[in-house]
């Protein structure tokens, strides 16, 4: 379960996050940044800005990845 995010956007302060990427994801992110001539931070900012979300803030792309990952884990789990 994810921790509750503590952030008050009305404070006017930037939000900071300390995140870790698995090697395959890191390679992809760094390649995206280099290809766009951006740093990783700016690449992530642009990705968030471009993300389409529903009225509840859910990203269709993120939801699809979560479901695909759950399906992969289910397939990998032995029945006995």
Image (spheres, rainbow, N blue to C red):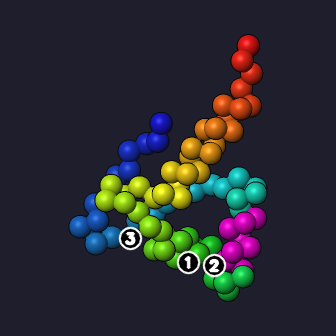
Label 3 environment density (alpha carbons within 10 Å; few <14, some 14–19, many ≥20):
few
Q: Residue at x 41, y 55 (%)?
A: 58
| Percent coordinates x, y for residue 42 in the rendering | 56, 77
Q: Disc 1 vs disc 3: which is toward the camera? A: 1
The disc, 3 or 2, on the residue closer to the chain's N-terminal end is 3
**Quadrant of res 41:** bottom right
To which residue does mark 2 refer?
39
- Crowding around mark 2 (Cα neighbors within 10 Å: few <14, some 14 to 19, many 20+) is few
The residue at which mark 1 appears reads as: 42
Q: Nearer the viewer, residue 60 or 3?
A: 60
Q: Which residues are magenta?
A: 27-34
- Closer to the chain start, of discs 1 and 3, is 3
Kindly indicate whether the residue at mark 2 contacts the one at mark 1 (C-beta within 8 angstroms): yes
Q: Is residue 35 left or right of residue 16?
A: right
Residue 15 x, y percent position in the rendering = 40, 65
Residue 74 location, x and y as percent?
66, 31
**Front-lying residue, 52 or 40:** 52
Point out which mark residue 14 bears: 3
């Amino acid at each position: 379960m994810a921790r509750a995010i503590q952030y008050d956007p009305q404070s006017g302060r930037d939000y900071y996050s300390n995140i870790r990427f698995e090697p395959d994801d890191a390679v992809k992110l760094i390649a995206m940044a280099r290809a766009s001539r951006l740093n990783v931070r700016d690449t992530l900012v642009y990705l968030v800005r471009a993300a389409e979300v529903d009225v509840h803030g859910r990203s269709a792309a993120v939801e699809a990845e979560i479901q695909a990952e759950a399906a992969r884990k289910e397939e990998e789990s032995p029945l006995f």
